[in-house]
Image (cartoon, rainbow, N blue to C red):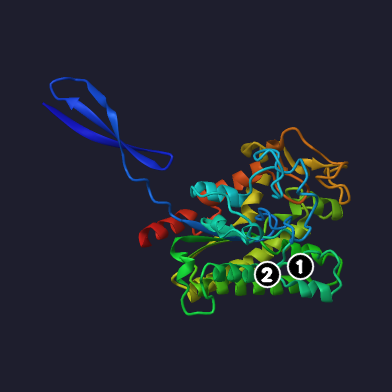
Amino acid sequence: MASSSVTYFSWKNTLIAITTICILSSSSCSASPATTKVNPRPRPFKKIYAFGDSFTDTGNTRSATGPSGFGHVSNPPYGTTFFHRPTNRYSDGRLVIDFIAESLSLPYLKPYRSIMSNATDAAHGVNFAVAGSTAIEHQFFVKNNLSLAITPQSIQTQLLWFDKFLESQGCKVAGAACKAAAFDDTLFWVGEIGVNDYAYTIGSGIPGDTIQQLGISRVTSFLQALLKKGAKYVVVQGLPLSGCLPLAMTLAPEDDRDGIGCVKSANNQTYSHNLVLQAKLQQLRTQFPHAVITYADYWNAYFTVMKNPNQYGFKESFKACCGTGDPYNFEVFAVCGTPSASACPSPSQYINWDGVHLTEAMYKVLTDMFLNGKATHPPFSYLLDMKLRHG
């Protein structure tokens, strides 16, 4: 006489059932050699639409019709760690959005500029982020004669691209409904946007409060547009700890430092920005109760690593891995990708990659904090639970 039980385990997103046959008259149990393949578990999301700046851009900057952006991202050693070649990502490897796609068992997102002629590349989503992009429209910087603002694309541009993309998919964005969008199964990932606005106005006499007010107003309008289209699951990243970037450390006076050794004025600026942004997100949650809006706390996640870098495997907190010059291995006119710059042998031990952007290792740590830690509010697990609950 025998009884059997079934044990399930997951392998490559497929549930495998192993039938264990136990002979009741014997003390031994053996697993039958046969296995039964059960239907794969459904992915929580089928698509991701991403927006933001160079921390999220996977190639829009260096396309044939894109802006020039920072550095020489199409040259080695960009991409050296994971892709083993430049992929027009501003890092030695993957970005947060790449790790997000991996966690959802989705392919890496194609940049919008590359899928314009091949819609099949957009089956699992599109990345609209542009390096150098701003929250405030480009014309504002032109009117104020701010020559550093060389990227004409802003978050409004990305919204226009998104509308054009939806129309190419048969969705009339001006209509009451947009069935082609299939937003029920779509994650909207809004990467950080706004650091460039502050950077472009350094020394201009334009108050930081003005940039904060205008920038958050534009981001809020952008989010309202997405939510009005029917976006239901939205993650919004705050601004990072910008005062810890070698660029900021190089330009700021040495007496402008905080308790972790970074530029105090810059970190206070982005911290204040994030507080106002979070208040706006709470208003949007009230205005759009059908949506789950999660805030990804980039600032505090970064701060947590800077307080104890060794815990996360980092040996160098301030110097750029790729660059040249002292004391931070960063010079504005000899940035990563130029002949005079070189890369460190172990990027995974560095927080910063090129003076402005982070290493793949740092992006991975931050992503883990967003997905599994306490750096998202409400937690990312809550967003997934709500998605699974509503199908």
Q: Mark 2 points at which residue?
A: 157
Q: Do the residues labelled 1 and 2 touch (CB within 8 Å)?
A: yes
Q: What residue type is labelled 1?
A: Pro
Count of labels shown? 2
Q: Left or right: where does residue 216 sit relative to residue 288? A: right
Residue at label 1? 152
Residue 78: percent from left, percent from top: 74, 43
Query: Which tag, 1 or 2, sits closer to the chain's start?
Result: 1
Q: Can residue 33 be seen in this view?
A: yes
> Tag 2: Cα neighbours inside 10 Å, few (<14), some, or many (≥20)?
some
Q: Determine crowd level at label 1: few under 14, some 14-19, many 20+ residues with C-alpha closer than 10 A.
A: some
Q: In this view, does 82 lie above or below 281?
A: above
Element at badge 1? loop
State the image coordinates of residue 345 (x, y, percent, origin top left).
75, 32
> The C terminus appears in which quarter of the rendering?
bottom left
Mark 1 to mark 2: distance in Å?
9 Å
* Frontmost residue, 242 versus 355: 355
Q: Is mark 2 on a helix, strand or loop?
A: helix
Where's residue 108, x and y in %? Answer: 57, 49
Q: In this view, does 204 lie above or below 369?
A: below
The quadrant the N terminus occupies is top left
Q: Tell me which amino acid carries mark 2.
A: Thr
Q: In this view, does 296 lie to the left or right of 208?
A: left
When asked about the image quadrant of residue 225, the answer is bottom right
